[in-house]
Image (tube, helix red, strand yellow):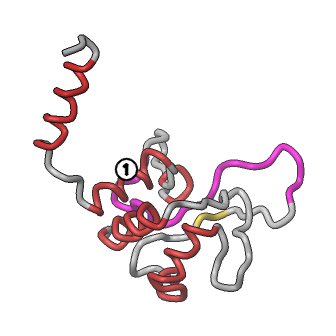
Amino acid sequence: MNLWLRPMAALVFFATLLPAQSKVERGRYLAEEAARCQECHTPRLPGGGFDRSKWMKGAVLDIKPLEPIENWKKTAPDLTRSSRLWLKWGDLALLNYLKTGKGPGGKVSARPMPAYTFKHEDADAIVEYLRSLP
Protein backbone atom coordinates (compact mmCIF):
# COMPACT_ATOMS: atom_id res chain seq x y z
CA MET A 1 0.00 0.00 0.00
CA ASN A 2 1.32 3.46 -0.87
CA LEU A 3 2.49 5.53 2.09
CA TRP A 4 -0.14 8.22 1.51
CA LEU A 5 -2.95 5.66 1.40
CA ARG A 6 -2.33 4.38 4.95
CA PRO A 7 -3.28 7.61 6.72
CA MET A 8 -6.29 8.02 4.42
CA ALA A 9 -7.45 4.46 5.11
CA ALA A 10 -7.05 5.04 8.86
CA LEU A 11 -8.99 8.30 8.65
CA VAL A 12 -11.87 6.63 6.80
CA PHE A 13 -11.89 3.71 9.25
CA PHE A 14 -11.89 5.85 12.39
CA ALA A 15 -14.37 8.36 10.98
CA THR A 16 -16.89 5.54 10.72
CA LEU A 17 -16.38 4.81 14.43
CA LEU A 18 -17.15 8.36 15.55
CA PRO A 19 -20.72 9.05 16.69
CA ALA A 20 -22.82 11.00 14.24
CA GLN A 21 -23.21 14.67 15.07
CA SER A 22 -26.79 15.45 16.10
CA LYS A 23 -28.75 18.04 14.17
CA VAL A 24 -28.79 20.35 17.21
CA GLU A 25 -24.99 20.02 17.63
CA ARG A 26 -24.49 20.78 13.94
CA GLY A 27 -26.80 23.79 14.22
CA ARG A 28 -24.95 25.04 17.29
CA TYR A 29 -21.66 24.81 15.43
CA LEU A 30 -23.04 26.65 12.40
CA ALA A 31 -24.77 29.37 14.44
CA GLU A 32 -22.02 29.95 16.99
CA GLU A 33 -18.78 29.12 15.19
CA ALA A 34 -19.51 29.75 11.50
CA ALA A 35 -22.12 32.52 11.44
CA ARG A 36 -21.24 33.90 14.93
CA CYS A 37 -24.90 34.82 15.62
CA GLN A 38 -24.20 35.50 19.29
CA GLU A 39 -21.99 38.47 18.38
CA CYS A 40 -25.12 40.55 17.71
CA HIS A 41 -27.99 38.53 19.20
CA THR A 42 -26.58 38.09 22.75
CA PRO A 43 -26.11 40.98 25.19
CA ARG A 44 -22.69 41.58 26.65
CA LEU A 45 -21.66 41.94 30.27
CA PRO A 46 -19.83 45.10 31.43
CA GLY A 47 -16.48 43.28 31.04
CA GLY A 48 -17.25 42.45 27.40
CA GLY A 49 -18.14 38.76 27.72
CA PHE A 50 -21.49 37.33 26.68
CA ASP A 51 -24.38 37.26 29.14
CA ARG A 52 -25.01 33.50 29.03
CA SER A 53 -28.31 33.93 30.88
CA LYS A 54 -29.61 35.84 27.83
CA TRP A 55 -28.04 33.71 25.08
CA MET A 56 -29.49 34.68 21.68
CA LYS A 57 -32.23 36.71 23.41
CA GLY A 58 -31.51 39.85 21.39
CA ALA A 59 -29.27 42.82 22.11
CA VAL A 60 -28.55 46.45 21.46
CA LEU A 61 -25.79 46.71 18.86
CA ASP A 62 -22.64 48.54 19.85
CA ILE A 63 -21.40 48.74 16.28
CA LYS A 64 -22.02 51.67 13.97
CA PRO A 65 -21.18 52.15 10.30
CA LEU A 66 -18.41 54.55 9.37
CA GLU A 67 -20.82 56.29 7.01
CA PRO A 68 -24.63 56.42 7.17
CA ILE A 69 -26.28 53.26 5.83
CA GLU A 70 -29.98 53.17 5.02
CA ASN A 71 -32.04 50.84 7.25
CA TRP A 72 -29.21 50.28 9.73
CA LYS A 73 -30.69 48.54 12.77
CA LYS A 74 -29.56 49.38 16.30
CA THR A 75 -30.87 46.15 17.82
CA ALA A 76 -30.67 42.45 16.99
CA PRO A 77 -33.84 40.43 17.71
CA ASP A 78 -34.36 37.56 20.12
CA LEU A 79 -33.84 34.30 18.20
CA THR A 80 -35.28 31.91 20.78
CA ARG A 81 -38.50 29.98 20.14
CA SER A 82 -40.54 32.17 22.53
CA SER A 83 -39.55 35.40 20.75
CA ARG A 84 -41.90 37.68 18.82
CA LEU A 85 -39.84 36.97 15.69
CA TRP A 86 -40.28 33.20 16.01
CA LEU A 87 -43.98 33.52 16.84
CA LYS A 88 -44.51 35.82 13.85
CA TRP A 89 -42.42 33.87 11.35
CA GLY A 90 -42.60 30.25 12.51
CA ASP A 91 -40.18 27.46 11.70
CA LEU A 92 -40.75 27.42 7.94
CA ALA A 93 -40.22 31.15 7.39
CA LEU A 94 -37.08 31.06 9.53
CA LEU A 95 -35.81 28.06 7.55
CA ASN A 96 -36.53 29.84 4.26
CA TYR A 97 -34.85 33.01 5.54
CA LEU A 98 -31.67 31.10 6.34
CA LYS A 99 -31.74 29.51 2.86
CA THR A 100 -32.59 32.62 0.81
CA GLY A 101 -31.57 35.60 2.94
CA LYS A 102 -35.12 36.95 2.57
CA GLY A 103 -37.89 37.24 5.16
CA PRO A 104 -41.54 36.20 4.67
CA GLY A 105 -42.32 39.40 2.72
CA GLY A 106 -39.41 38.79 0.34
CA LYS A 107 -37.28 41.54 1.84
CA VAL A 108 -33.62 41.19 2.73
CA SER A 109 -32.92 41.95 6.40
CA ALA A 110 -31.74 45.38 7.40
CA ARG A 111 -28.04 45.81 7.92
CA PRO A 112 -25.83 44.87 9.64
CA MET A 113 -27.50 41.43 9.32
CA PRO A 114 -25.88 39.51 6.45
CA ALA A 115 -28.15 37.82 3.92
CA TYR A 116 -27.09 34.21 4.53
CA THR A 117 -27.87 31.49 2.00
CA PHE A 118 -27.32 28.20 3.82
CA LYS A 119 -27.90 24.79 2.28
CA HIS A 120 -31.23 23.25 3.36
CA GLU A 121 -29.58 20.76 5.74
CA ASP A 122 -27.55 23.49 7.42
CA ALA A 123 -30.49 25.90 7.71
CA ASP A 124 -32.60 23.10 9.18
CA ALA A 125 -29.87 22.32 11.74
CA ILE A 126 -29.69 25.99 12.78
CA VAL A 127 -33.47 26.12 13.25
CA GLU A 128 -33.29 22.96 15.39
CA TYR A 129 -30.51 24.50 17.48
CA LEU A 130 -32.40 27.77 17.99
CA ARG A 131 -35.53 25.80 18.89
CA SER A 132 -33.51 23.98 21.57
CA LEU A 133 -32.55 27.20 23.38
CA PRO A 134 -34.46 28.15 26.54
Residue farthest to the front, as pictured: 1
* Residue for point 34% across, 60% down: 53
Vertical placement of residue 6 versus 23, above or below: above
- Percent of width and height locating residue 115: 66, 61
* Residue for point 23% across, 59% down: 22
Q: Which residues are magenta?
A: 50-69
Residue farthest to the left, as pictured: 17
Vertical placement of residue 118 versus 36, above or below: below
Vertical placement of residue 9 versus 77, above or below: above
* Residue for point 50% across, 70% down: 78
- Percent of width and height locating residue 14: 14, 34
The main secondary structure of the magenta stretch is: loop
- Percent of width and height locating residue 133: 32, 68
- Percent of width and height locating residue 49: 44, 42
Q: Is the residue marked by circle 1 packed among few (<14), some (14-19), or many (20+) residues within 10 Å?
A: some
Residue type at the position of mark 1: Tyr
> What element does badge 1 sit on?
helix
Would residue 117 be counted in the magenta stretch? no
Left-right relation of 11 to 54: left
Left-right relation of 90 to 107: left
User: Which residue bears the numbered disc 1?
Assistant: 29
